[in-house]
Image (spheres, rainbow, N blue to C red):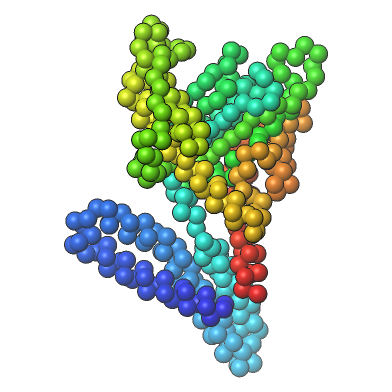
Amino acid sequence: MKASMQARLEQLERRLAEVNLLLSSEDAARDLDAFRRASREHSELSQVVGCFGEWKRAVADLRAAEQMRADPELREFADDEAQAAQARARAQEAQLQRLLLPRDPNDERNVLLEIRAGTGGDESALFAGALLRMYLRYAERQRWQAEILSASESELGGYKEVIVRLAGDGAYSRLKFESGGHRVQRVPETEAQGRIHTSACTVAVMPEADEVGEVDIPADEIRVDVFRASGAGGQHVNKTESAVRLTHLPTGIVVECQDDRSQHRNRERAMQVLATRLKDRRMREAQAREAAQRKSLIGSGDRSERIRTYNFPQGRVTDHRINLTLYKLQQVMDGELDELIAALAAEHQAQLLAELGEEAA
């Protein structure tokens, strides 16, 4: 292990001891916000420091085995012990390198997931509905909370556009690589000749702003329009101007919410979506500036980029960024996304490690 890395780990050991004292103090019990921050830091540090402890034990075992080699009767046993200790030390060092990678500050945030139908007309809208079901089933498996904030349904039962809020541990860290173009190849129900059609949807995964105040939006930059909601809801939607449309004048971003009967509630939801879109826009602009210097294949989140194809006749899903093909389409559409998400995260980690290696060189 490099001396700089070991020094960094020893520093984290000392910091963990400080956090332990802080958590046990009376001041922490009185300040709940400070207690939560310290608890979160303790959780992050404990994993790294624990792994560092395992590495140190493996190194100590290796040194003890090397000392035993001086005794001819113990040499064979010592060789086996040294080999096992060395393997453990290497494994722990590799794990430590991954744990010390720069963390995305948004990883633990909730997300707003937007799905928009693209090319393909009604078939694209139906596919948008299938993608929504896929992500909702995945969220259910993760025991996340899901809330549809806005939906524009198509005539055949799909969605022209739908926005859903997913709240749960590590939601953004798991879904952040889902942004981009999703393509489907299948025979539509309306196709009499049995021909395979290709259509597409765009998915956007945005880390939720903690609160509207996190993103400063001056009142004079927003135009607010209220109108009568359309769609399901009985007579109420025809008599009350409960739907809200917000237009952010500097960027042209438009947000509509009409799913709630309360205009106040619809306005709150629209502001939440607008703040999150603006946060996402600024984040992507920053990523674009970084990408101009160093291209990041996985983390670009380019909405125009085709990232995945769902081929129903062949029963396969292909992620084009990492050239991964899985012949388990139905399981994926039923929310079994762990294998895809894990592969994307592993590739991203490998890229970060390679970049750190280049910088060190």
Coordinates of residue 89 in the picture (x, y in percent): 57, 73
Work out whether residue 110 can be spotted: no
Give whichever of 336, 2 is nearer the camera: 2
Task: Determine the residue positioned at 56% across, 67% down.
Answer: 97
Q: Specify whether 268 is left or right of 298.
A: left
Task: Determine the residue positioned at 19% across, 56% down.
Answer: 30
Work out whether residue 126 can be spotted: yes
In the rendered view, tell whether residue 196 sits above or below residue 285: above
Q: Quadrant of the N terminus?
A: bottom right
In the rendered view, tell whether residue 288 sits above or below residue 306: below
Task: Determine the residue positioned at 60% across, 14% down.
Answer: 156
Instruction: Give the quadrant of residue 186.
Output: top right
Coordinates of residue 117 in the picture (x, y in percent): 62, 26
Coordinates of residue 311 in the picture (x, y in percent): 73, 31
Coordinates of residue 96 in the picture (x, y in percent): 53, 67
Q: Specify whether 315 is left or right of 263.
A: right
Work out which residue is located at the far top of the displayed protein and give it.
235
In the rendered view, tell whether residue 285 sits above or below residue 51: above
Give whichever of 21, 276 is nearer the camera: 276
Instruction: Give the quadrant of residue 135.
Output: top right
Q: Quadrant of the C terminus?
A: bottom right
Q: How many marks?
A: 0
Give whichever of 329, 145 is nearer the camera: 145
Instruction: Give the quadrant of residue 180.
Output: top right
Task: Determine the residue positioned at 27% across, 65% down.
Answer: 22
